[in-house]
Image: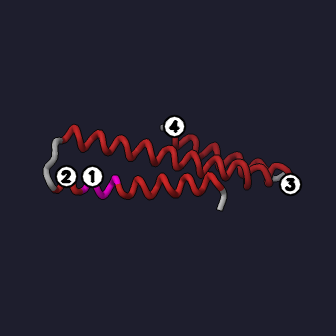
Amino acid sequence: MIEERKKALNLLKTSKGQIEGIIKMIENERYCVDISKQILSVQALLKKANLNILDSHIRSCVKDAILEGEGDEKINEIMNVLNKYIK
């Protein structure tokens, strides 16, 4: 497995644990601001995981497509993802 994918997987597993913790916080009627902070923390982990996946994709699939003269489609895919990411 590519290193960036391993990093993303670990981040996603951490996010999963945090989400389970957030669910328990809500069920236990914990303080709203504390819950919100935990949600923001998970969002940051998910963004980082996504960047790791995109990094891996660019360094492998996109790079190979460009070398084969077929990079436009891959570049358009990345730009569409980045467009959604920025919003």
Q: Residue at x 66, y 57 (%)?
A: 2
Q: Nearer the viewer, mark 2 or mark 3?
A: 2
Ranked by sequence position, the earlier of labels 1 and 4 is 1
In the rendered structure, find residue 86 and report the number of the disc placed on it.
4
Magenta residues (range): 18-23
Residue 63 horizontal side relative to residue 85, left or right: right
Q: Nearer the viewer, residue 4 or 59?
A: 4
Circle 3 sits on which residue?
A: 68
Q: Is residue 47 left or right of residue 53?
A: left
Instruction: Say what amino acid the circle numbered 4 marks.
Output: Ile
Q: What residue is disc 2 on?
A: 26
Looking at the rendering, in which quadrant would you find the N terminus? bottom right
Q: What type is the residue that disc 3 sits on?
A: Glu
Label 2 secondary element: helix
Q: Residue drawn at (46%, 48%), measured in percent from left and top?
A: 46
Nearer the observer, disc 1 or disc 4? Answer: 1
> What's the amino acid at mark 1?
Ile
Q: Which residue is mark 1?
A: 22
Q: Residues within 10 Å of mark 3 (few under 14, many from 20)?
A: few
Mark 2 residue crowding within 10 angstroms, few (<14) / some (14–19) / many (20+): few
Q: Quadrant of residue 51?
A: top right
Q: Position of residue 82 (x, y in %)?
A: 58, 42
Q: Which sits earlier in the primary sequence, circle 2 or circle 4? A: 2
Q: CA distance from mark 1 to mark 2?
A: 6 Å
- Report how far apart the C-alphas of labels 3 and 4 lie in the structure: 29 Å
Residue 34 colored in magenta in the image: no
Name the residue at 46% across, 55% down.
12
Tell me where residue 37 appears, x and y as whole percent.
Answer: 29, 39
Q: Secondary structure at mark 4?
A: helix
Q: Are marks 1 and 2 in contact (CB under 8 Å)?
A: yes
